[in-house]
Image (spheres, rainbow, N blue to C red):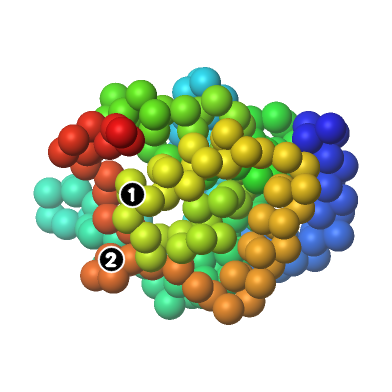
Amino acid sequence: MKRLFDILASLTALVLLSPVLIAVALLVRVKLGSPILFRQTRPGLHGKPFDILKFRTMLDAEDKNGTPLPDDQRLTPFGSTLRATSLDELPELLNVLKGDMSLVGPRPLLMQYLPLYSKRQARRHEVRPGITGWAQVNGRNAISWQEKFELDVWYVENRTLALDLRILLMTVAGVLKREGITQDGHATAEPFAGNDNKGETP
């Protein structure tokens, strides 16, 4: 049921939001240049890699050594607006349609985080990653990594279609309020550096 719902909902959303997708794509091309889409390898179901699709929000600015500048120096006001409204996430509907992602599930993070998870935290990969999730509607980037992972695992252990619908409704409300978009002192969120105590829950 969940996969069927994902297919029907993502296909419907892509059709209904096609004018928005085209408009955002044109604006990204004008304001940030090419490529329009940001692609990055992320871990999916059971940690299997896939390429996530998002609208680009940052400039390709580098220092004199060719190293990309920090996020806060590459993120433009236009890019910040895309993130605040979650419009940058819309291309992920293609990932959902393809089967790499679900509408609801733990957010797909970076490949380099995989060896840093505790056994319990790694359970977040027992389901497909989502465009939105229980952690996103309960703090998003305003809460700690450990809190996010606990919320992710709670979702894995308690997921139902009814819970997914609740999360989708809460996501819409959160986007309108623009809550939890960034972490204090960071353009987005502080990188995950692992657990001092391996994040194990007694």
Q: In this view, does 182 lie to the left or right of 19?
A: left
x and y percent of residue 116 in the render? 27, 30
- Three-letter code for the amino acid on which mark 2 is drawn: His
Q: Is residue 25 left or right of residue 4?
A: left
Asked whether the viewer can see residue 188, the reply is no
Q: Residues within 10 Å of mark 1 (few under 14, many from 20)?
A: many
Residue 145, numbered circle: 1
What residue sits 66% from the left and 72% below the top?
A: 173
Q: Is 86 in front, or is 178?
A: 178
Q: Considering the image in quadrants, where does the C terminus appear?
A: top left
What residue sits 80% from the left and 59% below the top?
A: 18
Q: Name the residue under label 2.
A: 186
- Three-letter code for the amino acid on which mark 1 is drawn: Trp
Q: Which of labels 2 and 1 is toward the front?
A: 1
x and y percent of residue 59 in the render? 38, 61
**Which element type, helix, strand or loop, lies under badge 1?**
helix
